[in-house]
Image: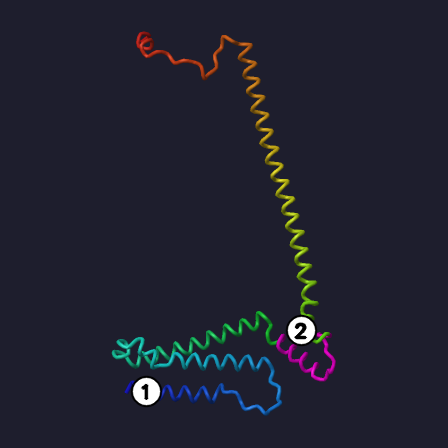
Amino acid sequence: MAEASSDNLGCGCEEKRHEGSSPQSVPPGTTISRVKLLDTMVDTFLQKLVAAGSYQRFTDCYKRFYQLQPDVTQRIYDKFIAQLQTSIREEISDIKEEGNLEAVLNALDKIVEEGKDRKEPAWRPSGIPEKDLHSVMAPYFLQQRDTLRRHVQKQEAENQQLADAVLAGRRQVEELQLQVQARQQAWQVRNPAVQSPAKVQPLCPSRRAARW
């Protein structure tokens, strides 16, 4: 019974897919908008995705559960496929809205339609795509290179200033250390009877015991 129902479901899904999302026959020479082409591509992708993840393959992956609960397996599969298609369509809709794809594709269709009546080359005066592309893109990349070089030079100058400031700080610290040592030596020369803290010897333990 479960196998028969899965076969019927597969046939029903195939019929619905062919009825609902199959593109209509278009006469030769008819221009289809790029928005419709995108929608057709999405529908075709979903059809192939559902066909690749058929109910038979689903049950093969969960054979033990399918043998115990065939009806539940059928409902899980139907819900999984429905949610998968919905999530993919929502994701593509979000991408279309974020990128304003419909307006961009419609504008591209308009440009193509307006350019059909033109005989002379509009953007490629030389007729050589590589040469024309180079003539347009090379100045842009050269400008970007000069901008990056200026940024690098500015950063290198700032880094050099920071390095000089660090070196100057180190020199000041060294000078202060030398001044402190010189003053300490001068003070010791003026007061020879006073020993430096480093030279003070601790009392002998025996003398400490004698005191106590």
**Which corner quadrant of the image does residue 211 belong to?**
top left
Q: Is residue 162 above or below residue 184?
A: below
Q: Is residue 205 above or below residue 17?
A: above
The mark found on residue 129 in the picture is 2
Q: Nearer the viewer, residue 87 or 26?
A: 26
Quarter holding the N terminus is bottom left
Quarter holding the C terminus is top left
Q: Residue at x 57, y 69 (%)?
A: 98
Mark 2: which amino acid? Pro
Is residue 36 highlighted in magenta?
Answer: no
Q: Which residues are magenta?
A: 103-125
- Circles 1 and 2, Cβ within 8 Å, touching? The answer is no
**In what element is the residue under mark 2?**
helix
Q: Nearer the viewer, residue 75 or 37?
A: 37
Residue 200 left/right relative to 69 = right
The mark found on residue 5 in the picture is 1
Residue 80: percent from left, percent from top: 39, 76
Residue 69: percent from left, percent from top: 27, 79
